[in-house]
Amino acid sequence: MNSLDDQMTCLLSPKSLVIVGASADYAKLTGRTVKYVLKYRYPGKLYAVNPSRTDISGIPCFPSVKDLPEAVDTAFLQVAAKAVPGIIEQCIEKQVKSIIIHAAGLGESGEEGKKTQARIKAQIREAGIRVVGPNCAGIVNMTQNLILSPIACYEIDDLPVGRIGLISQSGGLTGAYVSRAADRGIGFSYVISTGNEMDLGVSEFAHYLLRDEHTDVIAIFLEALRNVDLFRDVAVEALNRRKPIVVLKVGRTEVGARAAASHTGALTGADAIYDAFFRQYGIVRLETLEDLFEVPALFCKTKPPKGRNVGIITTTGGGATIVLEAAAQAGLQFPQPSDSTIREATAFLPSFAAKANPMDVTMSGTGGGFKKGLELLIKDDTFDMIVGVVGTSSQFEPHLGVQPIVEVCRDAKKPLVAFCNPNAADALRLFEKNGIPSFRTPESCGRALGYLVKYGEAIDEFTWKRGQRQTPDPDSPNAAKARKILANAGHILNEYDSKRVLAAYGIPVTREQMTGDVDQAKHAAKEIGYPVVMKVMSADIPHKTEAGVIKLGVSTEEALVTSYGELLEKAHRFKADVRIDGVLIQEMAQKGVELIIGIKRDASFGPVIMFGLGGIFVEVFKDVAFRVPPISLPDAREMIGEIKGAKLLNGYRGMEKMDCEAIAATLMSVAGLSLDLGEEIRELDINPLIVYPQEKGIRVVDALICR
Amino acid sequence: MNSLDDQMTCLLSPKSLVIVGASADYAKLTGRTVKYVLKYRYPGKLYAVNPSRTDISGIPCFPSVKDLPEAVDTAFLQVAAKAVPGIIEQCIEKQVKSIIIHAAGLGESGEEGKKTQARIKAQIREAGIRVVGPNCAGIVNMTQNLILSPIACYEIDDLPVGRIGLISQSGGLTGAYVSRAADRGIGFSYVISTGNEMDLGVSEFAHYLLRDEHTDVIAIFLEALRNVDLFRDVAVEALNRRKPIVVLKVGRTEVGARAAASHTGALTGADAIYDAFFRQYGIVRLETLEDLFEVPALFCKTKPPKGRNVGIITTTGGGATIVLEAAAQAGLQFPQPSDSTIREATAFLPSFAAKANPMDVTMSGTGGGFKKGLELLIKDDTFDMIVGVVGTSSQFEPHLGVQPIVEVCRDAKKPLVAFCNPNAADALRLFEKNGIPSFRTPESCGRALGYLVKYGEAIDEFTWKRGQRQTPDPDSPNAAKARKILANAGHILNEYDSKRVLAAYGIPVTREQMTGDVDQAKHAAKEIGYPVVMKVMSADIPHKTEAGVIKLGVSTEEALVTSYGELLEKAHRFKADVRIDGVLIQEMAQKGVELIIGIKRDASFGPVIMFGLGGIFVEVFKDVAFRVPPISLPDAREMIGEIKGAKLLNGYRGMEKMDCEAIAATLMSVAGLSLDLGEEIRELDINPLIVYPQEKGIRVVDALICR
């Protein structure tokens, strides 16, 4: 078959469809799928497979897939796990174009299931058929009236069609989104459950929705990201097209990550890496289940504001304070209105109303003050966006606070959102109908504005960062040099070799020489200049300090000779048959601020780069920043600024400012190295890297590379 | 009048009532109050005051308060701010027993309003009348059918009566609680808006609800706490009586605190101090608006579990993961079920269902598996509490997942709560009706369980801590000694005097002598033993290091003589007419770990004690712990354990363990001192306090006290 897009079109907008395992009993799961596909009037050709019937609710029914009168576009397999491989075979024979597998109990449960799933995978790969699932709760394309799912939320009548494309790694949760969103008047273009993602997954569906004209925002419930490279391309193109991607990802806690893993049978990488990756590619990470439809609904209706300044008008000070506080925690600002706004507001608001921000018109909002105040705030250039907070009137007297927002919104030249204090479902639906983003809780309202602003900033940032992002070059001379050193080393490189790899990428390391005997050591020390450091190099001694095989500040030849013997003795005491590569004679590095840079390979993301201040800052305060290479120089600078300890680099308490540009350059080099050498490097630790005052550079003092 | 309780009873359950400023027009705020008081059938005697009518909806109406036929228990003043003082006068004359003032525009807005409020305060103080407000949105006593409020939420029919007593510093928000809670089937015993709290406030109402037999949980929306001493007593007694107090407090951010302040005209203390205070007194601090009725509803129905182990059963893995993750973030645990539970579950659950924790019965929950699984988890001693997560069936087929929970709950011997994934309002109401705590969002469900566990732990903790909590003793010999030093000092005590105050409380300080000339200095150094530290003592030089008037490591008499002159010269260079108290000759303190202990007086809480590791730990990482004295030794130990840097005291990286008991004893002494001396000390800073390895104690190296 052709491109991924064509395959997806065939799957999501099939001209013909078969439900395998269909039942006429609507109380059964297998009957519900039939019920909903009919209820929503699927317009294509529809078949059923069930050996005991010839007709199900008017759908022509056949004993097996083999007996179908045509090669259908999509088959929905609602049969037990053990029956799946046989039916897949029939589908292949029949040249069915795409398959959705509903059955649970495969890749996510036990050895037996995993084996069967692997077998199915081999089948479909060979035949070139695309598959969704197994463990998939269905595929819904609201724009084509295709509801192919047994989830009971489709009992709801008149589900709104919206412009949010939803992809979920949890099938059960799709029922929650659809029913909760419907209650708010919010609809979807697609609702896709990806299940175990044996073949097609979040990345592939996101790739499709990116180009889909019915979808303005891609919303994802994520447990683990597969096919990161495709997803990265999708994210980049999404920023170009200004089509936001918002993600609710579980697994922030270890126990949550385990639960998610056992649920879909996928391993999730460290959560902090997802945070870094999302940030690098302008993907909005959400916090709550309701964010997953409230925030996309906001993004569908509203372009990001020009700045972070929010104006609030309210009939209830308390409610406004909660909205404000949630937004403030997201980094938004609440300047006071301009003098002229205050002057004009004073003219029509009663004396006890607050002519400030929030503009609290109190109960006087009931007298037309709300609308006038709202118009003033919209007119006031101080504000980049406006929130209308409506109190109890929103439930019982919508003409007082709700209607003014509806009337004013059409002419508002800046984002305007609403929050109703009480349980005002009707008001929320009215807002929704009029294209006004509205929120059920004050916290989600404040938070959502934060997301919108940050998304806008991400677009801007991305534009100027992208050009500077590094490209891997596995064939560069640096890479060749590094590869030569790696080829001659064991799985764990000693400090000397590790640093030579870094030096191949132009990273400054301490001056040092590897020596095989005392005479070489003397010679080296003379060349480097006393005092020197002496270190025993041995793959058997990964932690030199603990083994006592480091001698600092050796300042005379006499001391060097004595130390040489002592160090070797200690090495042998540490392990009787220790293999010694030599003794490293090293310059004493000047004091500076100690840093750590590390690379680890993540199963999903590949190399990940970490930065922090050394010692307690990493170990006690976990004060580190991550990025997923490739990175740009601005990314590297951001990493440095992101840690709390950055203050110690920026002229803390009369100390000189440190050479942060040299750190950023080193981060770039290390990230580049990790990309060029790819799987040839499993782990890399520079600890410590010492940074000196501005323009004085950095120096790698110790490093360890594992292949 | 008599006790606070009697006054409150009169106010909240009045036998007679007058609405001053009542209107017959139900579209007006002043008419709404009349409407609701009638609608809910207030059983006492009811009067109205309105000069233009003799009857309002059947209520006898009089031209003024003076004309009322009796001295009513409660008057609700719904008149403009400027009319209030005159009517108060009439109320006093008429011997009205309590007054509720609705008018805004007094203490919270401008000089004029503040003045009027002060005048009213003087009036009522003299007459001994208790007042709620001004800026009060009303008083509701559901147990007595008293709805005295113009808030439109009382349009709702059949508001449930509940056992949550709600006190709110925002009047507007009461509409949100009542309407939102009603939608969930949750009701209140009281809904009290306290407004500006000119007289009665949160503390006084909490005091009343504590003893009220209709109230099981006290829920508070808080902007600023007044009358902390009363509130502290209430909190202690509430723990004794096992009546939980839950609080939603705004003002975590600076901008939020400002908004709250401008809203009620009160200054809120630092948010971190509230956190500390709440923790010390077992008060549960909530995070969201909906927590304010969902969490109390949980507390009303459920006693705290015995431990932190949660078992989850679900029909939807994704929903369960979100609940689990929120609970895990609150510190709860999710052990695996016992072997026998797994064995029994395997017998009836299909192969693809997860016999683990969460127990994911998937769609098979529709076949009776949910109930059986639930019974197993309840029976399993591994779990202290159980969560049932129901998927889409909760909305469309409640008999499958919802009904089993209802059936099983009666016999459950441990807390059992429910969360419905989709928009299942009916299921939530059914749970509510059957006394099963239930939640609208997965995040609030997980969070709420965390609150319940922590409340249980607070009760246990409090019991064994309370006996050890210090009591102030302003007349102790220590206090007398300290007071003598204070009396002879200026507003800023120099280091020497500050340390003498600390020494009066038995806190170890460096050995040192104050000297007036070189000879005295020589003598002192000889006695203390070289090397010594020399410091110029002057109220004009609060920061000695910056002024260069410290000399460390003076090791000979010769050096001492030279330094003496140099230091004085530097002092004079710092300020020409500097007043010098003397030169302090001090032992060189041994190296150890540097700490900071501070006392600051907060406008609401009085002295507050702060602890942290010195330097960057405080300044860069803000890694500090607060408590409000009095504290106990366990409190002090907790403070030490609470900071992240505590790792550096507990044998970090082969370092010796530090003498944390000595730190705790010092925290106790400093807190005791702050209580004994009260307002005589405005601020106290010990920086640094050096701690040595275990049993080697601590030493105050520098200190500063401001009076």
Image: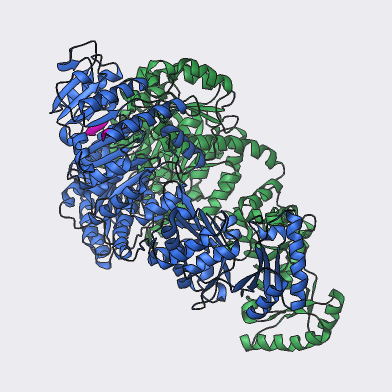
Chain colours: A green, B blue
| x then y, percent, for residue A248 | 46, 44
For residue B597: magenta? no
Of B348 and B222, which appears nearest the observer?
B222
| x then y, percent, for residue B610 | 49, 58
In the rendered view, tell whether residue A366 sits above or below residue A137. above
Quadrant into which the N terminus of chain B falls: top left
For residue B131: magenta? yes
Rendered residue at 51%/49% (across/down):
A225
Which image quarter: residue B548?
bottom right
Q: Is residue A398 left or right of residue A275?
A: left
Of A305 and A673, which appears nearest the observer?
A305
Of B472 and A101, which appears nearest the observer?
B472
Rendered residue at 66%/87% (across/down):
A570
| x then y, percent, for residue B612 | 52, 61
The span picked out in magenta is: B127-141
Q: Is residue B387 left or right of residue B578?
A: left
Of A635 and B17, which appears nearest the observer?
B17
Which image quarter: residue B77?
top left
Rendered residue at 36%/63% (across/down):
B470
In the rendered view, tell whether residue B305 sits above or below residue B109. below
| Residue B623 in sight from this viewpoint | yes
